[in-house]
Image (cartoon, rainbow, N blue to C red):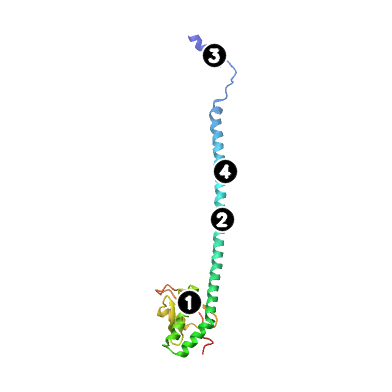
Amino acid sequence: MATEKASLSGGALAGAPDTAPAPWRARWLVPLVFAAFVAGVIALGLALHLQAKRSAEQSAWDSLRVTSELSAHSLDTWLAERTADADAIGTSALLVQALGHWRHAGAGHADAESLLLRHVERMQHFYAYRTVAIIDRQSGAVAFSSGAALDAGQTGQLARTEAGSRAQWIELGEGSDTGLRLGLVRNITDGVQ
């Protein structure tokens, strides 16, 4: 038995050809290939993620820019339309005639007041304003109104505004309970005596 051990160990040591790969190559080759593959997949994933992130950010900025431009354009258009509405109201022959009739008939004349109030209510509903009011600049009081009521400070501010034959926007202030913040003022009675 001792001789068998010697021959087995002697055969391996006696210079028999080594056909097996080196043990470190066999142990590390598969994990190294797998690690390289995983690193490549991670690098590709990070690159795709960063590209998608940049693309999403650029898309969001483009969307915000377009939205702000459209919002500004829409606001400008809306303000221009409301100014044109006020100019149309202020030059309405029917309204100017009704005001002239009311002024000549005197305060308390029911037919003239009823006609003028109907005009104001129609304008408020047609143009979808929250309030349409005709303010007597001399007394500083609301003569006719339809919609949300103006408070005394807003009425006084509107009466003091030097509006000409073109409509102008004024801020009505923050302290009001009416919720109205902007007013569009136009002198209607330029031609009415």
Q: Amino acid at mark 4?
A: Leu
Residue to which mark 3 is pinned: 10
Q: Is residue 77 visible?
A: yes
Residue to which mark 4 is pinned: 44
Left or right: 143 in relation to 88: left
Cα separation, mark 4 vs mark 1, equals 67 Å
Disc 3, SS: helix
Cα separation, mark 3 vs mark 4, equals 53 Å
Q: Report which quarter residue 152 is drawn in.
A: bottom left
Cα separation, mark 4 vs mark 2, equals 22 Å
Residue to which mark 1 is pinned: 122
User: Residue 184 has which mark?
Assistant: none
Q: Is residue 12 above or below residue 50?
A: above
Q: Amino acid at mark 1?
A: Arg
Q: Amino acid at mark 3?
A: Gly
The residue lying furthest to the front in this view is 111
Tell me if mark 4 has few (under 14), some (14-19) or many (20+) residues whose alpha carbon lies within 10 angstroms of its own. few
Q: Report which quarter residue 110 is drawn in.
A: bottom left
User: In this rendering, which labeled residue sits more in front, label 4 or label 1?
Assistant: 1
Q: Position of residue 14 (x, y in %)?
A: 57, 15
User: In this rendering, which labeled residue sits more in front, label 3 or label 4?
Assistant: 4
Q: Which badge, 4 or 2, comes first in the chain's sequence?
A: 4
- Compare residues 87 and 94 and report the one nearer the observer: 94
Q: Position of residue 7 (x, y in %)?
A: 53, 11
Q: Position of residue 139 (x, y in %)?
A: 43, 87
Residue to which mark 2 is pinned: 59
Residue drawn at x 52%, y 81% is: 90
User: In this rendering, which labeled residue sits more in front, label 4 or label 2?
Assistant: 2
User: In this rendering, which labeled residue sits more in front, label 1 or label 3?
Assistant: 1
Q: Is residue 61 above or below residue 183?
A: above
Residue drawn at x 54%, y 36% is: 35
Tell me if mark 1 has few (under 14), some (14-19) or many (20+) residues whose alpha carbon lies within 10 angstroms of its own. some
